[in-house]
Image: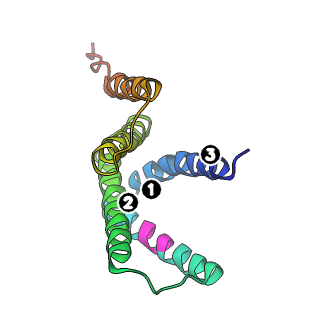
Amino acid sequence: MVVWLGYAVLALVLWGITGVTQKLSTNRISSERSFLWFCWAMVALSAVVAGLARPHWGLAPLVVVCSVAGGALNGLGAWTSFRALESGGKASIVISLISLFPLLTVVLAIVFLHERLTWMQGAGAVAAIGAAILLSLEAPPKAEA
């Protein structure tokens, strides 16, 4: 197995479990408190990674700006996902919908990085959009007798 694929599968498993833990937390505490605990976990994990990796800090300003922006956008995405779950969204639907963020990444990669999609990849993107629409459809509530 290619190394990157192993990491990608591990990320899939970890984020899959995360959707359930986020819903469990927002069922019991506010999205803001859930998000703060999420941030504390990220700070602790960041300290461990920094200790193990011993990163080289002499980075170009653009790299720092892109990294900070990525972290901020990730944090805002996490907070809004907590809000969606706290506001009554079902974990099976909310997490599935927000997990389609790679489609936006694909569009931005085409526009800014000049990447190209094969017809098969384009068909996959269309199928993902169709899946999102189908997942978001809910049956109307049953009328009480």
Task: Identify which amino acid the numbered label 3 is placed on.
Answer: Val
Marks 3/1: CA–CA distance: 25 Å
Marks 2/1: CA–CA distance: 6 Å
Q: Name the residue under label 2.
A: 29
The boundaries of the magenta stretch are: 37-42
The main secondary structure of the magenta stretch is: helix
Q: Which of the numbered marks, if any, corresponds to residue 109?
A: none
Q: Name the residue under label 3.
A: 9
Q: In which quarter of the image is residue 51?
A: bottom right
Task: Identify which amino acid the numbered label 2 is placed on.
Answer: Ile
- The first of marks 3 and 2 along the sequence is 3
Residues at circles 3 and 1 in contact by the CB criterion of under 8 Å: no
Q: Which residue lies furthest to the bottom in this view?
A: 58
Q: Which of 133 and 19 is in front in this view?
A: 133
Whether 136 is drawn above or below 58: the answer is above
Q: Which residue lies furthest to the top in this view?
A: 145
Across and down, in percent, residue 77 comes to 33, 56
Select label 3 or label 1 by which is in front.
Answer: 3
Task: Identify which amino acid the numbered label 1 is placed on.
Answer: Ser
Q: Is mark 1 on a helix, strand or loop?
A: helix
Figure coloring: rainbow
Look at 38% across and 26% down and name the residue there. Answer: 135
Task: Tell me if residue 67 is in the magenta stretch.
Answer: no
How packed mark 2 is, by other alpha carbons closer than 10 Å (few <14, some 14-19, many 20 or more), is: few
Q: Name the residue under label 1.
A: 25
Q: Residue furthest right?
A: 1
- In the rendered structure, the answer to whether residue 110 lies left or right of residue 10 reads left
